[in-house]
């Protein structure tokens, strides 16, 4: 796993420092700068050193926990990160919870009541959502819950309230909890549909297995067969998919934060990228990548938990 | 009289075609796509305006002043821009998919067929790449190299290449170990012939499905990049750009959002539906069952 | 002769498929007495498994329908028994083991867990007690080091051991009937004998009736009291085991016996086969289902279904048996 993180980070580094962003123009705009000041700035950022040295400095700082300084305003990237992280983390936490809830309910119900009206609606919903990018669904949500109610005087539908500022335990909003509901649902829906479908097809596949027949032959109730025997076996492919979707969630979060104007890590990175503020983008990218690799690791470990046939060493390119 | 099963036996591809067209949802998808493609092709011919043309009608609603779908905040005709947008999305998606498939087939094929350290190397590479969210790649590439057409294509290819590679590698590995391939090898058939006649046809079905989903994925990714400002930018008529620009007018003139939005969704959805239909039709496990 | 404990009476099973209605079972009748071991023999597709699974209501209903017939278990028709009561019977009074023990056991739970689960469903015992009982059962079927192996997973067992575990599980709640659906087909020949031996031993010891389903005549020869032969969804012959092997009455059975390679046949004797293949059951069949492949068919065979006629302790379904001379000439 660490190899992966290292490699990915190096990749990003390479990209940014092959053609570096330009701190000079960011600071000064169009004014021309006296050469001595130029030299100072370059020295400060170490840009006048050969690439190898820069690379070494980069890692040295990284181990110290220092992610560098923004070109734009000289803030420590760590600080910028901290600001955005809490917002993003809270959004993602609630999105993840909602997503699991939706995915499992929809997936289970549509598998158990296969062919029923509920299943059909669920299928339409899951397939339909796959074609809608997050920013579209986000804007759609904003429109229906923010704009329309205004115009139609449907105040009860007006959920679009400011992001809460008070939190207990770091994740539970005290006031303004409604500000979370919409973005969290928007984020959750994206992959909830996909996971629900995975779960459904996995469950139906498992149900054709012989051991399910044995379970029924033992006189077990349908509930026991579904929840105890079928579900656990069905989870295996679902966990894989879940891992992938968590990594993709970054992209989703960025769009959502942009749409709802939330000051999270996503918008920070997006803005920094537009300004070519490389250290910020690089720093945040490292965090995101590390997080992604960490999730992969957890997914692998959970395989071993769910399925005793799998030993931890047997990881393959999935 | 012999006791045999009734029914005509079909060739594989005939069977696939039959099943695909029996699926109502796929047909709907296909229809929508066809309509959109027709619009894309004939849009500029039919329309009086060009997509950059600024007219005096600002934010005018649909069906007014000769603008079938209205105009945006710069007075540009939405119908023209949207049809151009469809064309742009499809063109980009097709190119990206083509390149991705080429890369996937070659890298994946090599990895799968030769195994050993070659496979290891390529697989590790895939692993590494997988960890990077696609948005990040977009940020990196485009913020450094700019947002011209081919750079966007590059970014999208970098995002999607490993899906096709992984898939083809798995296909090749699976088929390689099949008994009848071993049999062919044992009877001295040349390697290239083995790949073409035996492995190829079996690896193709999953590729077709991945193709459809890669196209859909590219369309989505491109629009996300555009929306975030790291992909195509004004005045390029990308659907994502249009949606991004409509944000300010959501309250007064929602159609500026809804029109490109719906078109984008319909475009993506139609391809996804076709992809689903193809997958169901090609799945050998479902043949002969309902 | 005591009352039969299981009486499958003129069972009919249809399957609604997209191509039409498949008449899988067309009048199957079977009787089992307590403690008896009966073999149900037939080719793939003859309907043996469907019959067996129907007893426990394990056939999904759609697409299956039961237009006619009854399955009497101790006098009660299982086809009309409510699901809740059926669940108690499954495992508690009637148990079933299946063909492939690898896929028939849940791979993510230990063997001990799965056996205990069975016990706790039917008996009011603590988890600990159930665990102990599971170990006991495993020892009973001959699994070595049962105390340790009870916590192993199915994939850690060999094929034969897995099937023993399944038998242990099936007998753990003291059922009165064990249905064994091709229990040895997926196993090596050497192991097959062991498994059949265990089944026989435990069945006799505990007075459990056994319905042994297989396509392998060798398997039934050594262990069954009586044999029923099934073809195209009907019972075509039924007799005590020795009589069936010595003197088969129905041409199909006769053909089967003839096609078994014999140890003392001369070298280069051609293997006998029955020409053709079993009929398609879509839409039902006119007359005797075997007629098209039968060496002895007459006109009547193609239009009229022969009755299962009684011949003193045995029965067979063939028109030609009405002719006195036919029986002797057949052998």
Image (spheres, rainbow, N blue to C red):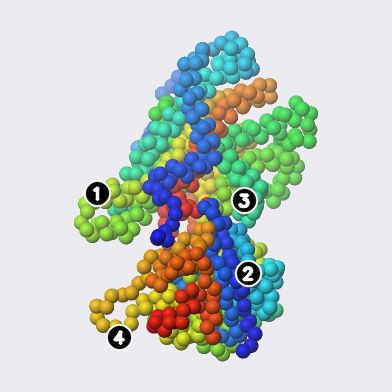
Q: Of discs 4 and 3, which sits in the foreground?
A: 4
Q: Answer whether labels 4 and 2 touch (C-beta < 8 Å).
A: no
Crowding around mark 4 (Cα neighbors within 10 Å: few <14, some 14 to 19, many 20+) is: few
Label ID, residue C69: 2
Give the residue at x 50% y 64%: C303
Quadrant where the N terminus of chain A is found in the figure: bottom left
Give the residue at x 73% y 42%: A177
Q: Answer whether labels 1 and 4 touch (C-beta < 8 Å).
A: no
Q: Mark 4 falls within which chain? A: C
Q: Mark 3 falls within which chain? A: A
Tag 1's secondary structure? Answer: helix
Q: Mark 1 falls within which chain? A: B
Q: Of discs 3 and 2, which sits in the foreground?
A: 2
Discs 4 and 3 carry the same chain letter? no
Residue C170, picture quadrant? bottom right
Determine the CA span between mark 3 and mark 2. Answer: 30 Å
Q: Which residue is mark 3?
A: A115
Label ID, residue C264: 4
Residue C136, picture quadrant? bottom right
Residue A168 is situated, as x and y percent measured from the top left of the image, at 72, 49
Discs 2 and 1 carry the same chain letter? no
Tag 2's secondary structure? Answer: strand
């Amino acid at each position: 796993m660490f190899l992966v993180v290292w490699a990915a980070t190096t990749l990003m580094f390479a990209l940014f420092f092959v053609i570096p962003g330009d701190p000079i123009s960011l600071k000064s705009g169009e004014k021309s700068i006296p050469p001595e000041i130029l030299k100072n700035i370059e020295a400060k950022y170490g840009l006048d050193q050969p690439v190898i040295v820069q690379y070494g400095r980069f890692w040295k700082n990284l181990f110290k926990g220092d992610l560098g300084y923004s070109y734009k305003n000289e803030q420590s990237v760590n600080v910028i990160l901290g600001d955005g992280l809490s917002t993003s983390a809270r959004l993602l936490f609630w999105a993840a919870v909602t997503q699991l809830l939706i995915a499992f309910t929809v997936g289970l119900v549509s598998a158990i009541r296969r062919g029923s009206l509920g299943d059909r609606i669920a299928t339409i919903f899951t397939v339909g959502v796959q074609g809608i990018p997050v920013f579209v669904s986000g804007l759609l949500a904003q429109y229906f819950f923010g704009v329309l109610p205004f115009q139609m005087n449907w105040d009860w539908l007006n959920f679009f309230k400011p992001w809460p500022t008070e939190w207990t335990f770091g994740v539970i909003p005290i006031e303004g909890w409604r500000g979370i509901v919409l973005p969290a649902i928007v984020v959750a829906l994206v992959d909830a549909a996909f996971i629900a479908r995975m779960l459904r097809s996995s469950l139906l596949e498992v149900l054709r297995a012989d051991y399910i027949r044995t379970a029924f032959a033992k006189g077990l109730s349908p509930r026991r067969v579904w929840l105890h025997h079928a579900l656990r076996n069905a989870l295996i492919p679902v966990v894989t998919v879940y891992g992938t979707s968590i990594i993709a969630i970054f992209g989703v979060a960025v769009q959502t934060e942009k749409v709802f104007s939330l000051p999270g890590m996503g918008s920070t990175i997006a803005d920094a990228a537009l300004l070519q503020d490389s250290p910020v983008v690089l720093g945040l990218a490292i965090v995101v990548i590390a997080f992604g690799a960490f999730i992969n690791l957890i997914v692998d470990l959970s395989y071993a938990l769910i399925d005793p046939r799998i030993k931890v060493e047997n990881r393959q390119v999935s | 009289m012999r006791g045999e099963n009734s029914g005509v036996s079909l060739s594989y591809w005939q069977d696939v075609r039959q099943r695909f067209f029996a699926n109502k949802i796929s047909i709907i998808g296909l229809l929508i796509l066809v309509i959109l493609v027709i619009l894309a092709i004939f849009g500029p011919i039919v329309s009086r305006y060009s997509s950059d043309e600024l007219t005096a009608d600002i934010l005018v609603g649909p069906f007014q002043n000769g603008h079938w779908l209205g105009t945006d905040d710069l007075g540009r005709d939405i119908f023209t821009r949207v049809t151009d947008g469809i064309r742009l999305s499809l063109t980009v998606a097709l190119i990206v998919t083509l390149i991705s498939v080429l890369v996937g087939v070659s890298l994946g094929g090599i990895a799968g067929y030769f195994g050993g350290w070659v496979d290891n190397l390529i697989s590790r590479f895939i692993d590494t790449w997988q960890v990077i969210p696609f948005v990040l790649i977009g940020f990196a590439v485009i913020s450094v190299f700019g947002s011209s057409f081919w750079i966007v294509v590059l970014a999208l290819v970098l995002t999607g290449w490993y899906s096709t590679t992984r898939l083809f590698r798995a296909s090749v590995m699976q088929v390689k170990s099949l008994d009848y391939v071993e049999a062919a090898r044992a009877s001295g058939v040349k390697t290239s012939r083995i790949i073409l006649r035996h492995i190829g046809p079996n690896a193709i079905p999953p590729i077709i499905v991945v193709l459809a989903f890669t196209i859909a994925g590219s369309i989505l990714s491109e629009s996300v990049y555009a929306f975030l400002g790291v992909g195509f930018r004004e005045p390029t008529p990308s659907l994502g750009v249009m949606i991004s620009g409509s944000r300010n007018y959501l309250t007064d003139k929602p159609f500026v959002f809804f029109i490109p939005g719906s078109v984008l969704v319909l475009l993506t959805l139609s391809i996804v539906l076709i992809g689903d239909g193809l997958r169901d039709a090609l799945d050998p496990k479902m043949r002969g069952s309902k | 002769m005591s009352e039969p404990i299981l009486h499958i009476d003129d069972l009919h099973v249809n399957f609604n498929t997209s191509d039409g209605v498949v008449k899988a079972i067309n009048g199957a009748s079977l009787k089992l007495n307590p403690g008896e071991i009966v073999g149900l023999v037939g080719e793939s597709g003859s309907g043996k498994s469907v019959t067996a699974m129907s007893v426990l209501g394990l056939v999904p209903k759609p697409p299956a329908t039961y237009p006619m017939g009854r399955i009497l278990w101790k006098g009660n028709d299982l086809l009309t028994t409510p699901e809740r009561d059926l669940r108690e019977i499954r495992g508690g009074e009637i148990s079933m083991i299946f063909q492939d023990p690898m896929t028939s056991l849940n791979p993510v739970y230990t063997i001990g867990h799965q056996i205990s689960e069975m016990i706790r469903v039917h008996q009011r015992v603590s988890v600990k007690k159930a665990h102990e009982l599971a170990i006991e059962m495993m020892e009973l079927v001959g699994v070595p080091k049962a105390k340790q192996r009870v916590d192993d997973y199915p994939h850690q067992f060999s094929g034969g051991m897995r099937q023993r575990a399944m038998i242990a599980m099936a007998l753990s709640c003291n059922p009165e009937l064990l249905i064994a659906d091709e229990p040895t087909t997926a196993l090596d020949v050497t192991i097959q004998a062991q498994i059949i031996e265990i089944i026989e031993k435990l069945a006799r010891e505990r007075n459990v009736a056994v319905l042994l389903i297989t396509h392998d005549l060798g398997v039934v020869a050594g262990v069954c009291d009586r044999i029923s032969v099934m073809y195209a969804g009907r019972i075509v012959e039924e007799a005590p085991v020795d009589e069936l092997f010595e003197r088969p009455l129905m041409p199909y059975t006769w053909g089967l016996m003839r096609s078994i390679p014999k140890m003392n046949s001369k070298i280069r004797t051609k293997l006998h086969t029955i020409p053709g293949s079993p009929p398609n059951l879509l839409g039902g069949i006119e007359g005797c289902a075997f007629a098209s492949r039968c060496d002895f068919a007459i006109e009547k065979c193609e239009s009229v279904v022969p009755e299962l006629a009684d011949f003193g302790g045995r029965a067979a379904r063939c028109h030609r048996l009405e002719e006195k001379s036919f029986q002797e000439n057949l052998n």
